[in-house]
Image (cartoon, rainbow, N blue to C red):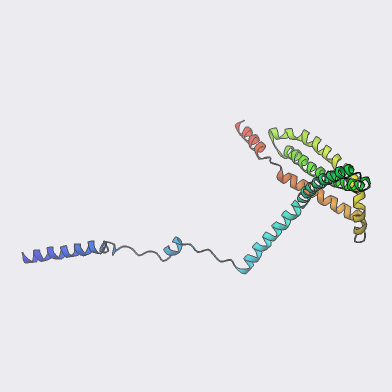
């Protein structure tokens, strides 16, 4: 009987210790965590090597250079058009003020400034119109289904924009004569003009093809083709 009471007392003491220690003995036999569990719980970013950093820097540099070369004519045309509109407005106000004061000789200089600004702005707006027309034409050529409807208006707009650009170049040609005379000292004028023309043509077509959105027409065309 004394042995039984002793066993009950020992069990009571063990239970009290278990509750007081926060159930620690219950988990004493639990399997230990694997050595890689801590690294999986808190992953550490891998460090890049020197050559990997150089490669990423070169990729970023080439991407920025490509974007700069591609967007340079568009940005220049936008800035030129805005500057020409501002110059036209200021010149018109100056002409009106000089005519009201009776200074007709000084008004002639303001009219020359108005003529130059108008020609340059006409050229910039013509280029922007040609870009938008090419976007419409390429949306029809690259699209599917109903997207083909953009071919005819795109072709008409492109032809009109080409006429507009040609007329603006003819008007601005006297203004480019001093610049061409300076460039003639470095290279033949025909080679320079040919290089600039090829760059503008390739850049404009590439930019228009990238900006033309043909996803919706392609999705509709594929959806109709699957349902048939």
Q: Is residue 156 above or below residue 15?
A: above
Residue extending farthest top: 228
Residue occupying image coordinates x 92% and y 49%: 174
Residue extending farthest left: 1
Closer to the camera in the image, 86 or 151:
86
- Residue 24: image x %, image y %? 27, 63
Residue 166 in sight here:
no
Q: What is the quadrant of residue 26 in the picture? A: bottom left
Residue occupying image coordinates x 71% and y 59%: 62
- Residue 116: image x %, image y %? 88, 47
Q: Quadrant of the C terminus?
A: top right
Residue extending farthest front: 101
- Residue 23: image x %, image y %? 26, 61
- Residue 142: image x %, image y %? 72, 40
Residue occupying image coordinates x 68% and y 62%: 58
Closer to the camera in the image, 152 or 21:
21
Report the number of discs: 0
In the image: residue 200, left or right of residue 27? right
In the image: residue 196, left or right of residue 33? right
Residue occupying image coordinates x 64% and y 62%: 56
Q: Is residue 141 above or below residue 110?
A: above
Closer to the camera in the image, 100 or 160:
100
In the image: residue 6, left or right of residue 124? left
Residue 207 in sight here:
yes
Q: Quadrant of the N terminus?
A: bottom left
Q: Is residue 76 above or below residue 34?
A: above
């Amino acid at each position: 009987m004394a042995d039984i009471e002793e066993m009950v007392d020992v069990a009571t003491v063990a239970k009290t210790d278990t509750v007081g220690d926060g159930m620690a003995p219950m988990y004493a036999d639990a399997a230990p965590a694997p050595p890689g569990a801590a690294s999986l719980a808190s992953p550490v970013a891998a460090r890049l090597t020197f050559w990997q950093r150089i490669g990423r820097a070169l990729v970023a540099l080439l991407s920025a250079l490509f974007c700069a070369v591609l967007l340079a004519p568009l940005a220049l045309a936008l800035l030129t058009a805005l500057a020409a509109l501002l110059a036209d407005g200021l010149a018109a106000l100056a002409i009106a003020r000089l005519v009201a004061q009776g200074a007709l000789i000084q008004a002639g200089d303001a009219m020359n400034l108005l003529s130059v600004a108008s020609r340059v702005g006409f050229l910039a707006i013509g280029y922007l119109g040609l870009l938008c027309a090419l976007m419409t034409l390429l949306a029809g050529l690259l699209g599917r289904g109903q997207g083909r409807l953009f071919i005819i208006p795109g072709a008409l707009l492109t032809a009109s924009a080409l006429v507009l650009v040609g007329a603006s170049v003819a008007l601005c040609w006297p203004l480019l004569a001093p610049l061409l005379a300076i460039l003639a000292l470095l290279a033949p004028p025909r080679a320079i003009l040919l290089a600039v023309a090829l760059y503008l043509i390739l850049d404009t077509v590439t930019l228009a093809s990238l900006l033309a959105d043909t996803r919706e027409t392609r999705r509709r065309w594929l959806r109709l083709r699957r349902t048939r």
